[in-house]
Image (cartoon, helix red, strand yellow):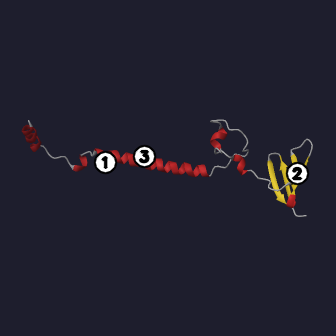
Amino acid sequence: MRAAQKQSNIGSKPTPRSARTNNSAFMRSPRVFWFALALLLFGLFTFIAHRQPPRPDPFQPVQALSWDWWQYPLERNAFKRLPVITSNLNDVFALPNSEKVWAVGDEGMIVRFSGKKMQKSLMWS
């Protein structure tokens, strides 16, 4: 039977090299493309994630899949980025029916709270 196949192959023209399909080269090409695309997307989304601003109110609870969940990064220790009062407080003054509070401390420290924002300044007397 092999002799019959060889005889039938002898009379046929050889197929050109470009017409042959090389399965291993064909399978590698899409893999390289998809790997390069995945690497590019990973780099792009990493860049975007590093440029995301933190949530304005770190104590606000996050609801899963809400707009804020997508817009701001997830923070595990958000309280650590808040300003810290390191000196002793001597007095605190608050205006009634207002969100304005002042606190004074050692070494000329004056802290002003207005709404949800805190401004810390040092005043020398």
- Assess disc 2: are there few (<14), some (14-19) or many (≥20) residues with their C-alpha within 10 Å of its C-alpha: some
Q: CA distance from mark 1 to mark 3?
A: 15 Å
Secondary structure of the residue carrying numbered label 2: strand
Nearer-the-camera pick, 75 or 51: 75
- State which tag comes first along the sequence, 1 or 3: 1
Specify the amino acid type for callout 1.
Ala
As drawn, the label of residue 34 is 3
- State which tag comes first along the sequence, 1 or 2: 1
As drawn, the label of residue 102 is 2
Mark in the foreground, 3 or 2: 2
> The N terminus appears in which quarter of the rendering?
top left
In percent of the image, x 92 and y 46: which residue is there?
Answer: 95
Residue bearing mark 1: 25
Q: CA distance from mark 1 to mark 2?
A: 72 Å
Secondary structure of the residue carrying numbered label 3: helix
> The C terminus appears in which quarter of the rendering?
bottom right
Q: 97 left or right of 18? A: right
Question: Contact (CB < 8 A) between labels 1 and 3?
Answer: no
Q: Write down the quadrant of residue 108 in the picture.
A: bottom right
Question: Contact (CB < 8 A) between labels 1 and 2?
Answer: no
In percent of the image, x 68 and y 46: which residue is there?
Answer: 77
In percent of the image, x 12 and y 43: which residue is there?
Answer: 12
Specify the amino acid type for callout 3.
Trp
In percent of the image, x 71 and y 50: which residue is there?
Answer: 80
Nearer-the-camera pick, 12 or 105: 105
Residue 25 in picture, x, y percent from top left: 31, 48
Residue 24 in picture, x, y percent from top left: 30, 46
Q: CA distance from mark 3 to mark 2?
A: 58 Å
Mark in the foreground, 1 or 2: 2
Residue 22 in picture, x, y percent from top left: 27, 46
Question: Contact (CB < 8 A) between labels 3 and 2?
Answer: no
